[in-house]
Structure formats: structure tokens, C-alpha cells
Amino acid sequence: MSSDWSQNPSQKLKRLGIDELWDNVRAGIQQVYARQSMVKSRYIELYTLLYNHCLQMSPQVQTKSKKEQKLREDENVSFELYKRIKEFLKNHLTNLPKDGEDLMDIGVLKFYTQQWEHYQFSSKVLNGICACLNKHLVNIAYSHKVCQIYSLAMVTWRDCLFRPLDKQVTNAVLKLIEKERNGESVNTRLISGTIQSYMELGVNEDDQFEQGPMLTVYKEAFEPQFLADTERFYTRKSTELLQQNPVTEYMKEVETFLLEERRRAQTYLHHSTKGKLVRKCRQVLVEKHLEIFLTEFQNLLNANESEDLGRMYKLIYRIKNGLGEFKKLLETHIHNQGLAAIEKCGEAALNDPRIYVEIVLNIHKKYNALVISAFKNHADFVAALDKACRGFINNNAVTKMAQSSSKSPELLARYCDSLLKKSSKNPEEAELEDTLNHVMTVFKYMDDKDVVQKFYTKMLAKRLVHQNSASDDAEASMISKLKQACGFEYTSKLQRMFQDIGISKALNAQFKKHLMDSEPLDLDFSIHVLSYGWWPFEESCTVLLPSELEPCYRRFTAFYASCYSDRKLSWAYQLSEGELVTNCFKNKYTLHASTFQMAVLLQYNTEDAYTVQQLTDRTQIKMDIVTQVLQILLKFKLLVLEDKSANVDEVELKPDTLVKLHFGYKSKKLRVNISLPMKIEQKREQETMYKNIEEDRKLLIQAAIVRIMKTRKVVKHQQLLGEVTTQLSSIFKPQISVIKKCIDVLIEKEYLERVGDEKDTYSYLA
């Protein structure tokens, strides 16, 4: 028997007619919707009835015509059963709206949610009983408008009960939400239950067996009214709060409102509404009051209220184009604060690089911290900080006093020199590295980076030659930072200078070995051999070396010629230094002096007094330099004037002025450094520096023009100006007038020409 059953199970089942089948099913459905308890056996019985019905409708192996006929009969039976279930549900709900039509507010919500919960539960039970019928309905969906039984129940509820009570229920829900917004305690279960029904009712009997709720009812009946109600509520609320509270307190309230609305959305709204709700709240609470926020933004900047600024940023940053005016305000504020801080220090900042750079760093540090903490490092505010710093660093009270925009880069280079030069105030290595990083922050804002390069190169050269660098590692670190910021070409000379120092150390060792193998000198002697063109030094002034120094000069010159016959030495006396030991004073002193000072002082081994002209003749040093050297020696009181009461600073040294050796010289230190820079040298050095910068810029501009013309072949005047400016802006900002002059120079040199009658067009000449 089991074998026959498996081959044709339908032969063992009794086929029920539609009326008999429906009578059994209807009794069960009535029990379900009457909320009567149903034993498990009764549930299984109903399920089995429909299961057997569907099983009997499964097509067997028959001829094609018989099979098609049976399918049509089965479709009719299933559709008839579907219609009867639909009619039952409709009749079940027909009288319910009358019970709720006179109810309002809480009453209608309680009625609606209670009926909904019972109906939804009963519909899920019915859907379980009809599980097999649902599967069979899929097969007839192409010819009949049907859906799953649960969806049918939702459609029937929507049409028979929801539509008549739609406005009453929605208004009641919105009133309850408004009460909650006003701080009243409400039954949120009524709200969530009602809204959940809106989401469940979004089905369409015509869209057969769609997946999941379509939210049509929720989107049409609730969401637009809810958002409109939200706008009205917060428009009124924001006006009241701004009239009664300062903006800072208002922002705290807005934060609370937004948090509450997000919680509300998570608690009983569909997730698709959350974004719309928050945007609507921002629009009403923030965007409509941006002018008030702008005014308060400036006040908060003035008061440095970082916390409130951060709160304001969180409220405005998601508003489309909302940050534009705030960014401009921040930029203007930082720019003005920088200008004011520099102007306050006045000449102190002009004369002391440390004061100037620390002012700039303090302003940047303060507002960089604000941008990070309050504005979350937003790109717009970072750009505002950068633009403001670039503005006040390159054009401020100091640059105006110096009448040069290049004063800022010069002061930065001098500040680096003070950090990297040996001093009792040198910071620890880690602190120094941190300070150099801050220096690079200021450096990136400099328009004239070529000026920094020139001054830094000059000062590095002096540190290397005079061996007073605080740390080789720090020097290498700084060069690495500059290279990373501006490229290899920017630091190529700096690196070559270090190479020369290394080569010079080896050369000194060879020379000492050479002296030991021949005749040693009477004094210690070392030398730096510097490659011509890589070091930023001018040609040396002439000086007749004293007899005590002449052997050093002669012996090394001969040694170097024997090593490098194809090279020529040019002596830079203005950079040379030495030590003199005194035997003419009460105490024995060691004087650290420049070559010019040594040449003058060694003359006093022969005589006790000389005129200025005599010293000039005997040393072959120019008169103006001899005068400067004597001024320094007179200040140290190593030499004295004939009139000992004369003020050294006010006396004008003439050729016949007599200068004597001061035998009564005293100093608290036995080692005295008298090698001070001469004013005339400093002034000439400064003038030469800026002159070289201008000449180098012209060459760079000409090179850029040639590169552009070689690529473009034919270029309009304005386009050429723009491209030259763009190419060179990372090093300096070329002036338009200088670019025009460089174009004329290149036309004269026949690198380019004007095209025909078009005066504003240039053509490249290969």
C-alpha cells in the first residue's frame, strides 16, 4: 500500500467540493477573528484541509488537453476560495468604523491600535493556515489579481477601516507627538502602534506578490503631515527661544531638539524618514537663522569661545553652502589678529627674529587648535587659516617698516640661524626638532621662499666655516625639510656645502701629515677649501698678511698645488679667524680675532702707536675697513686714542688720528672674543644679497618663459603671464612688470618674437 500511496497519493484523498471546503475553513476563520482560543489540533486540521486541496490540484501525468482543462478547474476553485476569504474579511470589518467615528485624540488611537493589534495577529494566524494556498496562488497570479492572504487582509483593513478613520487617527498621532515635544508624558505605544500599521498597509493587490511593504500609506497619509507639523512646531519654538535666550543657549536647545528627533525617528518612525526629519529641523532651527548665527560667530571668535564655536559648527556644517560666510569671517578674524599682534610689538619684532617668528607661531598655533577642535579640521576652515596666515605673514607692520615684503622671509632665516647656532640657550634635541617643524609651518606661508633660501644659505655657510653649528643632525634635518617642501634644486647648494666641509676635514689631515713629514709650522693651522659657485661669499678684500701668518699661507698654497695642479686658490680673508696670545698686559689673554684685526694688532709688536693712515699702508686694507676694525678694538679698549676722554662712538677716525696700544687693558675673562661683524660689511652684504635675489629672479623668469614658449610655440600675452606666475609661485610671486621686461630681453636675444601685427601674441624661435 505504501508503494501505491507514493506513486499516486491523490487517489487516497477525498476531494471536497468548494462549498464543503469553505464551510470548514470559514468556521475556523471566524474562530480566529473572534479571538477565541484554538487548540493545536484544530489549527492542524484547517491547515491540512487546505494542504490537501492544493495537493489535489497539482497536475498529474495526463494528456495535454486534459491537463490544461484540470488546471483551469483548479484555478477557478482557488480563486473562488480567495474571493470568499476576501469577502469574509470585508464583512468582518464593515461595522468597526462606526464604533470609532465619534472618537477623537487618545480615544480614537486606543480604539484603532487595539483593533489593529487583534486584527493583525488574527491575519498572521490566517496566513499561516493558508500557507499552501499562498504558494498555489502564485501559479494563478498571471490570470487573476491576487496576493498573499496576509497582504489581502492588510488591503481589506486599509479600505474598510483605515480610510474612514484616516484623518482622525493621523491628527490624533500628530497631537500626541506635539505633546511629547512639549515635554509632556505620553503613551508612545499608541504612536508606534499606529505608525506601524501605516507601514504594514502599504500593499497593492494589483502588484502581485511584491516583496515587503511599499510604504505608500505611510508616505501619503502620515509622513508629509508629520514633516509639515514639525516645521510649524519648530518655527514657533525657535522664534520664542531666540527672543528669550542668548544664541549660545539657543544652540544648546537646538542640540537637544535634534537628539530628541533622532531618538523619535529610531523609536517609532520608518528609517527613511530620519534623514528628512533632521534636515527639516536643521532648516527651521538653523538655516532660517543663519544671519543671527553669523553675528554670534564673530562674537564667539572675539571671546575665543571654542566650545560654543564647535557647537555652532556641528549645527551648520551639513547645510548646503552654509559654511561660506563663516569661513570668510574666520579668515578675516585671523588675519586681523595676526596684523594686530605684530603691530603691537613694533620695532622689537623688526629687530629680533625670535620675537617676530614666535608671534606668528603663537597666532597659528592658537587658531590651528581652534580649527582642529571646534571645526573638526574641515577643509574650508583649514583653507581659511592658511589664507589668513599667508596674508598677514607676507604683509604686515614689520614689512611696511622695512619697506620690503621680503623682510618676513629674512627674519625667518635669521630665526633658524639663532636656533642652529651654538649658544648657551640651545634647546634639547627633541625640542629643537619640534621647533624646526613649527618653522616649516611658517615657511610654507612665505611668498618669497627664494629670499629664505638666500639668507639661510648665507647663514649656514657662516656656521659651517666658523664651526659653530649646534648640531649636525639638526642641520641635516632642516635641509631635509626644505628639500621635501621645495624640491632637490632648492637645497642642492646646501648639500654641496656639507660635502665641501667633509672634504676639507680630510684635506686638513693630509696637510698635517705633510707638515710632520717635512718642517712643522710654529702655530696650529686649519683651513676650509670651498668650491667656487656653491658658497655665497663675495671676493675677499686685500690684506698684507703679517710675517707671523705668511708661512701658513705659503706652505698650504704649495701643498694644495702639488695635490691639484689644475685648481686655483682664492683666499677669503674676511672669513678667516685666529687666536692671539697677549704678552703686553698685566694678565695673559687669548683674543679670538678676525684676520683684519690680527693684521692690525700684530703691527703693535713693533710700535706702540700708529696713525690710521700708517695702519692702512702697513696692512694694505682699505681705509673704510681699517676704520671699522679700529672702532671695534677701541670699544674693547685694547687700543686707545690720544685723547683718552673722547667718546669712541662719536669720534670720527681720520687718516692722521693716532691710535695707541692700551697697556692698562683689563678683562674679567682670559679668553675674549673680539671678532664682531663690521657694520660696513653687514650693510654691503645686505645690499648685495637683495641685488643677487633680483638678478636670480630675472633669470628664473626668463627660463620659465623659454620653457613655456618651447612647449606652446605660440602664446597670447595674458596666457604667458599667467603660466609664468603659476610656474614660479612655489618659490616667489613674480611682478608683472618684471615679466614684461624679461619678455623684451628674450625678444632682443631672439628667443621669441611678436607675431605679425598681433602685439599680444608671441612665437617661439627655435
Image (cartoon, rainbow, N blue to C red):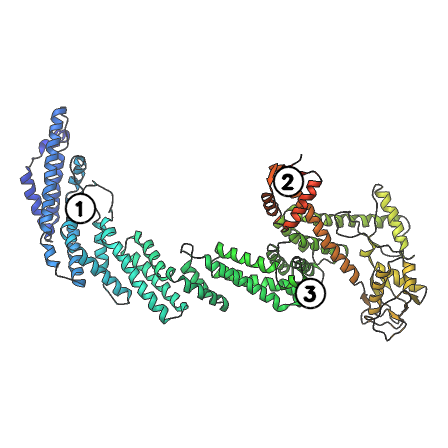
Quarter in which the C terminus is drawn:
top right
Quote the CA–CA distance across marks 3 and 2: 40 Å
> Label 3 neighbourhood size at 10 Å, few (<14), some (14-19), many (20+)?
few
User: Which residue appears at 5% of the width and 43% of the height?
Assistant: 23
Query: Residue 606: image x %, image y %?
Result: 95, 64
Spatial CA span between label 2 and label 1 = 77 Å
Q: Is residue 174 left or right of residue 659?
A: left
State which quadrant residue 50 falls in. top left
Q: Nearer the viewer, residue 24 or 205?
A: 205
Residue 552 percent coordinates (x, y): 88, 53
Label 3 belongs to which residue? 351
Where residue 686 appears, as percent x and y from the top left, is 74, 57
Q: Assign a secondary structure to mark 2.
A: helix
- Disc on the earlier residue, 3 or 2: 3
Which residue bears the numbered disc 1? 150
Q: Residue at x 17, y 50 (%)?
A: 158
Question: Residue 440's mark?
Answer: none
User: In this view of the protein, which residue sits in the foreground, 515 or 751?
Assistant: 751
Residue 677 visible somewhere in the drawing: no
Question: Toward the viewer: 638 or 503?
Answer: 638
Write down the residue under mark 2. 707
